[in-house]
Amino acid sequence: AKRWINIRKSYGNFYKVPRNQTKLTMMLENLGMNYDGRPHSGLDDSKNIARIAIRMLQDGCELRVNERMHAGQLMTVSSLAPLEGAPAPQMPRYRN
């Protein structure tokens, strides 16, 4: 893979949160989700990242390639047009 979508970067840009709030467990918690599976399991981490991506798409995010490798160097891919973000996710409110 030479190009990919860094979900942490997309999440931070879309919900307008700083990089230190884009850890996997924190992103899930802010979206009102629990971590499913065993921590640090590659498969379980991937499934949870997919759940975050699905939620972002439901919230109106347009996921785009935002990183790539060029000559062995990690490069940021800038978007051609700025995308509007959504407000930061809130913990779900439960009705009584």
Image (cartoon, rainbow, N blue to C red):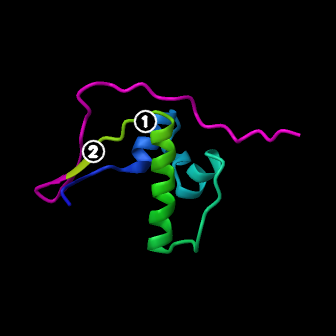
Q: Quadrant of the C terminus?
A: top right
The secondary structure making up most of the magenta span is: loop
SS state under label 2: loop
Task: Say few, some or many: other residues with alpha carbon within 10 Å of mark 1 (under 14 / 14 to 19 / 20 or more).
Answer: many
Q: Would you say residue 81 sits in the magenta stretch?
A: yes
Q: Quadrant of the N terminus?
A: bottom left
Which residue does the numbered mark 1 point to in the structure image?
61
Give residue 65's mark: 2
Which of the two marks, 1 or 2, is nearer to us in this view? 1
Q: CA distance from mark 1 to mark 2?
A: 13 Å
Q: Is residue 37 above or below residue 49?
A: below
Amino acid type of the residue that numbered disc 2 sits on in the rendered structure: Val
Q: Is residue 64 above or below residue 44?
A: above
Count of marks, rendered view: 2
**What is the x, y in percent for residue 48?**
51, 60
Instruction: Tell which of 58 and 26 is nearer to you.
Output: 58
Q: In this picture, which residue range is highlighted in magenta?
A: 69-96
Q: Residue at x 61, y 62 (%)?
A: 35
SS state under label 1: loop
Amino acid type of the residue that numbered disc 1 sits on in the rendered structure: Cys
